[in-house]
């Protein structure tokens, strides 16, 4: 299939369904409300250059240890199936019928990937519910002296706790982790409406993202 060939009507319909989880930007005088706009449709590519001199340095770090009670941040665990992790992801995209057994198996597979796959969650320990999550994938490259590139995916904050900078915390945490792992940049996809949120995390617009669904 050539790069210029359009998606079929069926693929376009599937793509539109996936975007049902996209969060719309709402005008609000409180800037914190805007900071938790989450990742939706794949319409744009943003990049955080970690080691290139021409990019202005920005403070993209944010302490996760000072999360307000009752929130704690940690890695994804198999028990998070019962704490609503999949229901949270459904606020972003289609999840499907995933059993607890399948969930547990996939989490264990992710763990075996070590530093190449990190899923971070924020839990409300009082409610025993997952309220925020994001994923970092590390790509090995031959370019850039066999460099590494970080990819941030599946960023979502539960509707009930937006406005508390939880989204910014997990994104900045994963960007910092990518730097620690030796990535020369970290990139992600987002809608145009959500770009201001990621710019607050230190990202800048870069090129255009394309997708082909199967």
Image (spheres, rainbow, N blue to C red):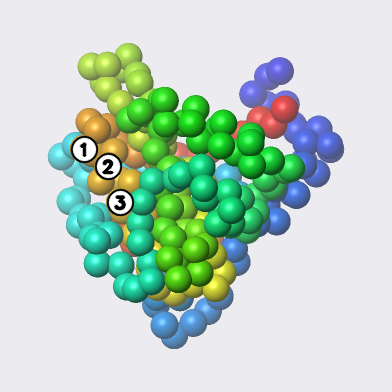
- Position of residue 130 relative to residue 181, above or below, is below
Q: Which residue is mark 3?
A: 173
Q: Report whether 146 appears left or right of 46.
A: left
Kindly identify the residue that appears in the image at 83 percent across and 37 percent down.
10
Figure disc tally: 3
Give the SS element for disc 2. helix
* Circles 1 and 2 in contact, beta carbons < 8 Å: yes
Q: Is residue 183 visible?
A: yes
x, y percent for residue 39? 52, 53
Q: Image point 30% across, 46% down: which residue?
A: 175
Figure quadrant of the N terminus? top right
Left or right: 97, with 52 as reference point: right
Inspect this view and state whether residue 188 appears.
no
Front position in the image: 21 or 204? 21
Crowd tier of the residue under label 1, counting other residues whose Cα lies within 10 Å: few below 14, some 14–19, many 20 or above: few
Q: Residue at x 34, y 39 (%)?
A: 186
- In whole angstroms, how far apart are the C-alphas of marks 1 and 2? 5 Å
Is 108 or 179 nearer to us in this picture? 108
x, y percentage for residue 145? Answer: 23, 16
Residue 177's disc number: 2
Q: Determine the secondary structure under disc 1.
A: helix
**Disc 3/disc 2 C-alpha distance (Å):** 6 Å
Which of these two is toward me, 188 or 9? 188
The C terminus lies in which quarter of the figure?
top right
Asked if marks 3 and 2 touch (Cβ < 8 Å), the reply is yes
Locate residue 126 relative to residue 199 in the image: left or right.
Answer: right
Q: Residue 148: x and y, percent? A: 30, 26
Residue matched to label 1: 180
């Amino acid at each position: 299939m050539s790069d210029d060939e359009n998606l079929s009507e069926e693929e376009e319909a599937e793509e539109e369904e996936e975007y049902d989880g996209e969060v719309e930007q709402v005008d609000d005088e409180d800037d914190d409300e805007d900071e938790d706009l989450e990742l939706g449709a794949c319409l744009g590519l943003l990049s955080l250059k970690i080691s290139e001199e021409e990019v202005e340095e920005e403070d993209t770090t944010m302490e996760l240890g000072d999360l307000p009670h009752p929130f704690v941040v940690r890695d994804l665990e198999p028990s998070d199936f019962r704490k609503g992790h999949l229901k949270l992801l459904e606020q972003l995209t289609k999840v499907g019928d995933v059993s607890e057994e399948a969930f547990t198996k996939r989490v264990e597979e992710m763990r075996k990937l070590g530093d190449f796959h990190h899923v971070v969650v924020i839990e409300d320990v009082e409610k025993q519910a997952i309220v925020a999550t994001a994923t970092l994938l590390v790509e090995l490259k031959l370019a850039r002296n066999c460099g590494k590139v970080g990819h941030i995916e599946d960023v979502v904050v539960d509707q009930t706790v937006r406005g508390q900078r939880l989204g910014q915390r997990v994104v900045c945490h994963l960007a910092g982790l990518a730097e620690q792992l030796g990535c020369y940049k970290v990139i992600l996809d987002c809608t145009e409406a959500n770009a201001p949120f990621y710019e607050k995390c230190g990202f800048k617009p870069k090129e255009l993202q394309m997708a082909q669904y199967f």
